[in-house]
Amino acid sequence: MNDLRQSPRPKLEHLDDRPVVNVSEAEYRRLLGYPAHHTTGARADELAGWTRGWYATHGRPWVYLREVELQVAREALVIDGMGFQSSRLHAHLREAGAERAMLVAVSAGQACEAHASQLWQEAKPDEYFFLEMFGSAVVEHLMATLSARICEIADHDHLMAVAHYSPGYTGWDIADQNRLHALISRGQTRPFPESLEVLSSGMLRPKKSLLAVVGLAPRNGLTPVSPQLVPCETCSFAPCQYRRMPYRHAAVRPAGAPDTRPPVAANGREPTYSVNVRALRKWAKERVRLVPGERGTVEACFRFDGTTCSDQGRPLAFDYAVTLSGPADGYTILDSSCRPAAGDTGHTFMCAYLSDSDGLMRSLDREKPLLGRPLGEVLRWSRSPAAAGCHCNSDSRAHNWGLALEAIHFALVQEPAAFSP
């Protein structure tokens, strides 16, 4: 087998100024301080619902990622040409055998902090507290989903991700926040969508933000001796296919306790989507096209915009075309296809295309999920979400098919006024 770690390739740089935010109820409740199985009252539920609604409308989260060189010598730690004196960070990366690193920045956005401050000035401490904690939950969620993407990128190169480490963590002086911020800024070619400042104290503005270093180490099939090196314990991204240890805050339902997860309604009119409803509503308006077909059928098209998982995250576009029966037959999927959009060149930089373009295109032609089944079954389709926006492996392709079919379902069922056959 070729050693992909020795193959020269451009370093990855990725910026997403519109990441999907879908903070789980369990994570939000944990940060609010509620016990795992505590039943909240009407006021708390009202505040939590208001907070989610406000952030869905006004929140401006973003994530940034860049791959850099790493030298972990016996006496020195150098990241992308800059030395760091933290003996704990040095030991963290050295113990894992890290060979490369990812520099990470995530933020819940300036609007969240500004509005929380306004609520405090207006003497609304409850609203302030719920929004503050939701901002923290957003940062944790962004870091978890970004960690999943780093795990997938590392796996392509036969590496594994090491748990992220940030200034202010045990043994790494918060004052190094300035150096890490300067290091990230020095090599940026994609500026942050909003300013991110480091105060003299080392704290960030906006405060619901995080800077971190993620080491990449050789994957030998074994879990590192020290659990602190494994990112999984602090990562809440439950469906990650690269999980090696359980999440330390995972909720465990007591034996005999009822499953309170919201069911999918039998009539399909109250569906439970895996995608954030705000995103689905936006996609239904901007990415889904519905056209009446012959004999009462519906021709649906979904435009997928993503990025490659390597080569600096080049943008790519795919068109998903689906032929459906009429509503009387439950919008049964009669035919479907997924192809690169006309004029798109980004797909030619996907690692799967570069290694076997014919094989990748045959897979795209062959895979027709839920063919012959009602469209609503996408809501029950068990699949492994993928962090990357490419189509290189079957999990990524299934994940993207799920996005397309859920967006089409939403456009037909939840926004029926948008289509009149």
Image (cartoon, grey):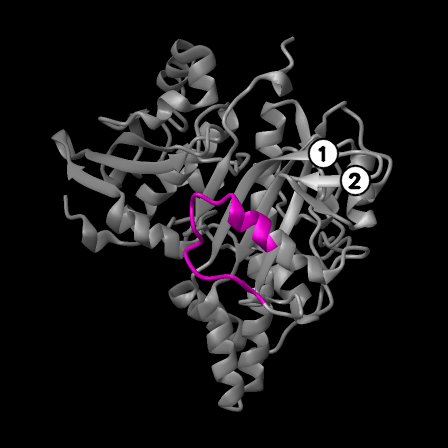
Location of the N terminus by quadrant is top right
Q: Which mark is residue 390?
A: none
Please tell me in which quadrant of the rendered image residue 67 appears: top right
Where is mark 1, residue-wise?
71
Q: Position of residue 10 (x, y in %)?
A: 49, 27
Q: Which mark is residue 76?
A: 2
Question: At 57% across and 65% down in the image, what residue appears?
Answer: 208
Location of the C terminus by quadrant is top left
Instruction: Tell me the kind of residue under disc 1.
Output: Gln
Which comes before the other along the chain, label 1 or label 2? Answer: 1
Packing grade of label 2 (10 A; few <14, some 14-19, many >=20) is: few
Describe the element under mark 1 as helix, strand or loop: strand
Question: At 40% across and 40% down in the image, what residue appears?
Answer: 403
- Do we see residue 142 in this rendering? no
Vertical placement of residue 269 versus 322, above or below: below
Packing grade of label 1 (10 A; few <14, some 14-19, many >=20) is: many
Residue 306 painted magenta: no
Vertical placement of residue 36 versus 19, above or below: below
Magenta residues span 181-198
Residue 190 painted magenta: yes
Vertical placement of residue 302 versus 258, above or below: above
Q: Position of residue 355 (x, y in %)?
A: 47, 13
Question: At 70% across and 40% down in the image, what residue appears?
Answer: 78
Q: Position of residue 93 (x, y in %)?
A: 77, 39
Vertical placement of residue 180 versus 58, above or below: above
Residue sitting nearer the eye, 382 or 358: 358
